[in-house]
Amino acid sequence: MSIYNTFLKWWLLITSVFVSGYFAYDFGVFELFYEKDITRLSFLITFIFLMASTYCGIKSFQISKIIRDKIITEGIRKKIRKIEKTENLGWFLSDICLTVGMIGTVIGFIIMLVGFGTTDASDAESIQKLMGQISSGMSTSLLTTLAGLVCSVLLKLQFFNLSQSLNEVRNK
């Protein structure tokens, strides 16, 4: 493995995410999320993703330095154990992103279905209000699911890269 291969893989992924994020911003995707996700859970998921990604980047840099130095002392072994704990935290946070996305899905369905009990089928205004509520609930449901899935997959890619490097260091 080259000197900073772990960190460079992380950097490539994060750069791709930010470039994609720029285009998403330019096309109004973030505005769509802000308008349609009434729970704002997609922003919580994005925050968790950004914090976990930053942390993974720091640990990727540290493990790259360990691989570069090729000398494993007792102090280095302690650092490796700390990074292993980080690896477990990363997998946990990727599952949290997915779970929060699913919670948003359930909340969206609840918002969508709550109006059915109070709707008068003979009143056009009541039906129109119900359709707006269904639309709001469905968009919340789908947007939080999308945010949870995408952020979870991107975190798993980062922490998989870190895991592969940790396995290389463990085998030395």
Image (cartoon, rainbow, N blue to C red):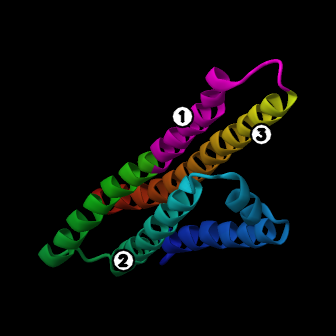
Cα gap from disc 3 to disc 2, whole angstroms: 51 Å
**Residue wearing tag 2:** 62
Q: Judging from the image, what secondary structure is the residue with disc 1 in? A: helix
* Residue 51 vs residue 113, the one in the foreground: 113
Mark positioned earlier in the residue sequence (3 or 1): 1
Q: Amino acid at mark 1?
A: Val
- Which residue range is magenta in the image? 97-123
Q: Amino acid at mark 2?
A: Gln
* Residue 82 vs residue 123, the one in the foreground: 123
Q: Judging from the image, what secondary structure is the residue with disc 2 in? A: helix
* Residue 131 vs residue 17, the one in the foreground: 131
Residue 42 can be seen, yes or no: yes
**Residue wearing tag 3:** 132
Residue furthest out toward the top:
122
Q: Judging from the image, what secondary structure is the residue with disc 3 in? A: helix
Q: Residues within 10 Å of mark 3 (few under 14, many from 20)?
A: few
Percent coordinates x, y for residue 57 in the rendering: 46, 73
Q: Residues within 10 Å of mark 2 (few under 14, many from 20)?
A: some
Q: Is residue 121 magenta?
A: yes
Q: Mark 3 or mark 1, which is nearer to you?
A: 3
Q: Tell me the quarter of the image containing the C terminus.
A: bottom left
**Residue wearing tag 1:** 106
Percent coordinates x, y for residue 69 in the rendering: 34, 81
Q: Amino acid at mark 3?
A: Gly
Place residue 28 in its image quadrant: bottom right
Q: Is residue 32 magenta?
A: no
For residue 146, which numbered disc appears in the image?
A: none
Q: What residue is drawn where x is 52% and y is 71%?
A: 5
Q: What residue is drawn where x is 71% and y is 38%?
A: 133
Cα gap from disc 1 to disc 2, whole angstroms: 39 Å
Mark positioned earlier in the residue sequence (3 or 2): 2
